[in-house]
């Protein structure tokens, strides 16, 4: 797995579009280092990116259930979704 900036990440408004928040920094909370910028009038875009490390960790933990509980293989579609998300995040 590639190294990424450790969580937690958060969003900070850095500018506005027509008086509304529209430009966001994604920052690593403990260092305040900027990870990326998002231009969107929808704060949900920035919040989703800020949640990425936590979502990756949750996917990895959920995928481990398939290894520990073979009966989970009945949900093979879920296994594939988790596996694809992890690959997308780590390749």
Image (spheres, grey):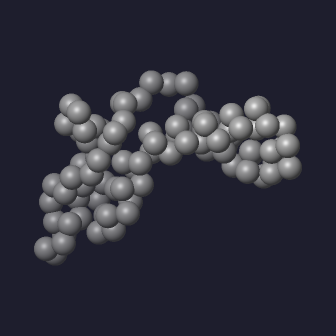
Name the one closer to the observer, 37 or 74. 74
Number of marks = 0
Q: Is residue 39 left or right of residue 60?
A: left
Image point 71% across, 38% down: which residue? Answer: 65
Image point 38% across, 63% down: which residue? Answer: 44
For the N terminus, the quadrant is top right
Residue 11 in sight in this render: yes
Image quadrant of residue 64? top right
Name the one closer to the observer, 71 or 12. 71
Q: Position of residue 77 (x, y in %)?
A: 78, 52
Q: Is residue 74 left or right of residue 23?
A: right
Q: Is residue 90 left or right of residue 5?
A: right
Q: Is residue 19 left or right of residue 87?
A: left
Q: Position of residue 31 (x, y in %)?
A: 21, 31
Q: Position of residue 69 (x, y in %)?
A: 79, 37
Image quadrant of residue 91? top right
Q: Position of residue 47 (x, y in %)?
A: 36, 56
Image point 73% across, 51% down: which residue? Answer: 78
Residue 37 in sight in this render: no
Name the one closer to the observer, 7 or 20. 7
Image point 29% across, 47% down: which residue? Answer: 10
């Amino acid at each position: 797995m590639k190294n990424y900036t450790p969580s937690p990440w958060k969003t900070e408004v850095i500018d506005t579009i027509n008086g509304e928040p529209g430009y966001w920094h994604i920052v690593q909370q403990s260092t305040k280092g900027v990870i990326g910028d998002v231009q969107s009038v929808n704060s949900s875009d920035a919040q989703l990116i800020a949640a990425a490390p936590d979502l990756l960790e949750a996917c990895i933990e959920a995928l481990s259930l398939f290894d520990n509980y073979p009966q989970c293989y009945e949900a093979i579609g879920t296994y594939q979704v988790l596996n694809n998300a992890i690959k997308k995040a780590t390749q």
